[in-house]
Amino acid sequence: MLLSLLNNLRVVEKLAESRPIRRAAQITAYAITKAQIVGRDASQRALRSQTLRQVREETGRLPDGVEEVGRRLKRVGETFVNEVKDGWKDGSRQVKK
C-alpha cells in the first residue's frame, strides 16, 4: 500500500510541495554544503601543515644515530600537538559563529 502511494505521481508532487518536505530539503542542502566547505578547509590546512612539511624534511635526511631519530620524532610530535591545539581553537571559533 505504501509502495503504491509512493509510486503515485500526484502524491509525490503534493509531498514535494509541502512545507515540511521543502524545509527538510533546504536543511539537507545546507548541511551538505557546509560539510563540503569544512572539508575543503581542513584539506587546505593539512596541505599547509607544518607537521607534514617537517615529516617530509626529516624523512629526506638520513639520521646519524638513534638519538638523532629520537630528537626528530620529538620535534615532529611537538609540532603536531601545536597544530592540533591551533586547529581545535579554530574549530571552536567557527562553531561559535
Image (tube, rainbow, N blue to C red):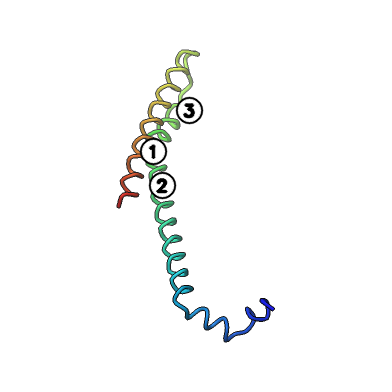
- Residue 36 locus on image (x, y percent): 44, 57
Residue named by callout 2? 42
Residue named by callout 1? 49
- Residue 71 locus on image (x, y percent): 42, 18
Q: Given the current orientation, which residue lies at the most extreme bottom position? A: 10
Residue named by callout 3? 59
Quote the CA–CA distance across marks 3 and 2. 24 Å
Quote the CA–CA distance across marks 1 and 3. 16 Å
* Dot 1: element: loop
Identity of the residue drawn at 52% across and 83% down: 14
Q: Are marks 1 and 2 in contact (CB under 8 Å)?
A: no
Identity of the residue drawn at 33% across and 40% down: 89
* Dot 2: element: helix
Q: Please tell me which of labels 3 and 2 falls first in the chain.
A: 2
* Dot 3: element: helix
**Amino acid at dot 2:** Ala
Foreground of the two, 9 or 78 = 9
- Residue 93 locus on image (x, y percent): 31, 46
Identity of the residue drawn at 38% across and 29% down: 79
**Amino acid at dot 3:** Thr
